[in-house]
Image: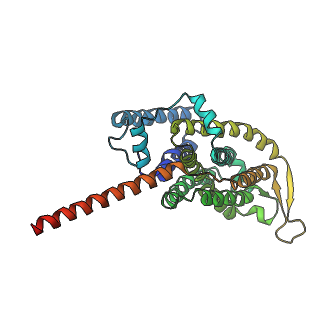
Amino acid sequence: MWFANNERSTSTAIALNFNQIGIATAFLVGGSMATNAVGLENYFGLIAVATSIITVGTLLQFQNKPELPPSMSELEKRILGEKEPPFLESVQKFFNTKGFTNALAAFICSISITNVVGTFIDEVMKRGGVTGQFEIDLAGAGFEFAIVIGGIILGGLVDRTKEYKKVTLACLAATAFFVLPLGLTDHALGREPLLLVAALLGLGMAAGPVQPINAELAVDVTYPGDETAVESVQQIGGNLVSAILIPLAEMASDKDFTLLPGVPGLESDIRGDVVLLITVALITLGYFSTFDAPLKRTLADDDGAEEVANLINSVSSNALELETIRIRE
């Protein structure tokens, strides 16, 4: 509604992933303040003051919708008087729309993996040799910032190219790759803090952008459907699967598997929780590779832009003819 067709993924990445800035702040500020009951009380007080100020500022600046539609697809919806149907009716329509479940699966995979890693960040870092609490907090904050930065960079790329599928496939493959070092233990490859931190940041950059990109992809394939309902379904699905995956990952973390057995210097144990996350990423990668649906909103934007261009050319030609006739007279 608010952004042009070459700004949507970037704006969604900022809005959707900026939640991670709050989590990063919790790592940096909460980690040092909430060390005892008094510190925890002061931390909650700080949160209350900060959120109250931000809420008031938001309410003072909030607008219902832009006066001028920022895109041809949004203009078309206004002209046609599109009305959002009841939520359950929208959900049923979404699941019958080709391509929606692919985007939903990618979104759920991304949010589930980042939630699991964020939940067990202390254990993940300690198993790789990062044991100081301040260092763990820094690594956790870096992971959250990487999610935001990756979303902005790759969201901008998708805005320019509309290559939702290629970018998502690359991100899912990179997610599986970067998850691997987080579970290495006991042997040489598993005790490299630098490798661990680099993998954590790479995971944030790879997994984070999948959410805003596929939020926009889902809206694109379901156009002119209810955008709010699309986001609601994805968030509900992502949080529900996260709630199921977190205890499963905790149980799997007690299991060890041998990676590259018999290879000198590279043989290492890998924890079961990371095997679980890699499996989720690879299954999602395989399913998303079947995506083959028309980008209805993008097509509406392109068709509208072409019609406007033709109209401008026609008006310009008529004006030129009239000016020529006037000069001759």
Res 277 visible: yes
Residue 325 in picture, x, y percent from top left: 15, 65
Q: Residue furthest left?
A: 329
Res 5 visible: no
Residue 27 in picture, x, y percent from top left: 57, 46
* Front residue (pair 293, 152): 293
Residue 68 vertical placement versus 320 (above, below): above
Q: Is residue 239 left or right of residue 312?
A: right
Residue 329 in picture, x, y percent from top left: 9, 66
- Quadrant where the N terminus sits is top left
Q: Is residue 130 left or right of residue 316?
A: right
Residue at the image position 39 percent from the left and 54 percent from the top: 307
Residue 263 vertical placement versus 233 (above, below): below
Q: Residue furthest bottom?
A: 264
Q: Is residue 259 left or right of residue 18?
A: right
Dividing the picture into quadrants, the one containing residue 203 is bottom right
Residue 34 in picture, x, y percent from top left: 57, 38
